[in-house]
Image (tube, coloured by chain):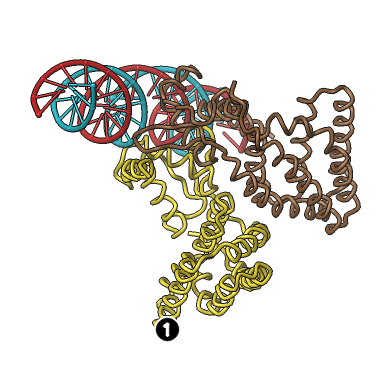
Chain colours: A yellow, B brown, C red, D cyan
Amino acid sequence: MAEDLRDKLGAQHLPLRDQVLAALRTAIIDGDYLPGERLTEDRLAEDFGVSRNPVREALRVAEAEGFVVILPRRGAVVASPSSGTIADMFAVRERLETLAARLAAERANPTDVAALRALLEQGREATQRQDLARVAELNSMLHLRILQISGNPWLSSIAKSLYLHVQWVFRLGAAERAPHSWVEHIQLVDAIESGDGDRAERAALDHLDAASAAAHENAEGGYRAR
Amino acid sequence: MAEDLRDKLGAQHLPLRDQVLAALRTAIIDGDYLPGERLTEDRLAEDFGVSRNPVREALRVAEAEGFVVILPRRGAVVASPSSGTIADMFAVRERLETLAARLAAERANPTDVAALRALLEQGREATQRQDLARVAELNSMLHLRILQISGNPWLSSIAKSLYLHVQWVFRLGAAERAPHSWVEHIQLVDAIESGDGDRAERAALDHLDAASAAAHENAEGGYRAR
DNA sequence: TAATTGTTCTTCGTATACACTTCGTCCCGA
DNA sequence: TCGGGACGAAGTGTATACGAAGAACAATTA
C-alpha cells in the first residue's frame, strides 16, 4: 500500500548499471558481441556512453548469469554456449517448466487466462503476417507469463534466466520454428485454463520435447564464428 | 605445464570483491546480518576493511543470488526469506534434485561412488560423536557432490544456489534433523550405485519429502533473533 | 633459434568529488 | 497542541583519476 507506493516511486529510477546490464544481455543474445569476444571495461563504457563503474557492476551480474566469463586480471569475454550443454539446458527446462505449467493450471484465474489468450491471438496474427521477430517475442512473453502465473518466485527467476540462454543459443532457429510451435501453445493454454495440472504438465512436456528436437537439428550449425 | 602453472597462478588471485561476496554470504547465512538489516556500503566497506567499489560489486551479485534486496537510491537490506517461500523452494528442489539423482545414477563411475561412500562414513562417525555442525557440513558436501556427479552444469549451479538458501532458512533446524536423515542418504547412495535412475529418483524424492516435512515443522519458529 | 627483456594494455583497488534522494528533525504558524 | 514545510544529514549513483600488478606481445640478445 503506502509501502508499495514508495517502492514504485523509488524504483522508477533505473540505475545505469541496470540499463547497461540489459543492453549487454541484449547485445550478447543478439550476437552483437560474439562468443569469445573480449569485452574490456573501457570499450563497454564507451559503447554505452557511461563510466567504468556501472559497467563493472553490470559485468559481475552478467557473469553470475553465465553470459560472460571473467578471468582475474585478464578481463571479461563473452561466454561460449557450447552445443554440448543444449541437452543439459533442456533437461532442466523440462523439470522446471512442466512444474510451472502444473502450478499455473492450479492457480490461474480468469484474468491470467485472458492474458494468455490475448498473447495467443497476437501470435496468430503475427504468424499470418510472417513477422517472425514478433512471433519469437510473443513466444517469449507467453512462456514468461506462464512462469509468472505459477506464483513460485524461485521457479520464475531460474527458468527465466534459463530461457534467456536458450534464446541466445537459438536466436535464429527458434524464430523459424516458432510458427510451427503455436499449435502446441494453444494446447498448453487450454490445459492451463482447464485447471488440470496433469494435463498442463503433459502439454508443457510435449512442447518442450518438440522444441528440443528442433533445437538439436539446428545444433549442428551452431554459432557461425566471426 | 608451464602454461598450466601460469594459468593457475593467475587464477589464484582472488579479487577482493569475491572475498567480500563470500564473507557477505557467510555472514548472512550465519545470521550475523539479520533479515531486514540495512547494509550501507560504507558500513560493509568498514566491516571488511575495503573500499566501496568491491563492496558494491559484491552487493550486485548478492542481489542476483537473492541474499539481499537493493532498493534504488535507498541501498541494500538483507533479504527476508519468508516462510511462504519455503514450500516454493522445496517444490523446485524436488524437480531438480530428483533429476540430479537420476543423472548421477546413470553416470556415476566407481570413483564417484567411492567418494560418496566416504562421505557417508564420515557422516556416520560425526553422528556418533554428536558433532552436529560437522554432520550438517557433510550433509551439504554429499548433496553438492551428487549434483556434480550429475554432470549437468546448469542443474549443478542452480541447485547449489537453492541449497544455500535452504541452509540459510534452516541453519539450525537442518543440523538437528541431519542425523535422522542419514539413513535416507545411505539409500540414496545405494540407488545411485545401482545405476537405476528410477530408483535413485525415488530415493531423492523420499529424502526431500522428509526434509520438507521437517522444514515445515521448524518453519513456525522462523528466525530466532540473536 | 630460444630465452630474456621491455613495453603496453588492462584489470584491480583506492580515493575523491558531487549531484540527487531520502529521511528525520526541528521550527514555525495556525 | 498539532500539522506542515524548511533544512540538514546520510547515503546512493555516477564520474574520474591514479598507482600497483599481472598478462600479452614485441623486440632484443645470446
Q: Decide which of B115, A31 is in the foreground and name it.
A: B115
Name the residue furthest bottom: A128
Residue B195, placed above or below residue A201: above
At label 1, the amino acid type is Gln
**Secondary structure of the residue carrying numbered label 1:** helix
Q: Is residue A16 visible?
A: no
Q: B71 left or right of B20?
A: left
* Crowding at mark 1 (Cα within 10 Å: few <14, some 14-19, many 20+): few
Residue named by callout 1: A128
**Residue A63: horizontal and vertical position, in percent?**
52, 43
**Residue C15: horizontal and vertical position, in percent?**
35, 17
Residue C6, placed above or below residue C22: above
Q: D26 left or right of B190?
A: left
- Give the chain letter at badge 1: A
Q: Decide which of A11, C8 is in the foreground and name it.
A: A11
Q: Quadrant of residue A32?
A: bottom left
Q: Residue at x 48, y 17 (%)?
A: B49
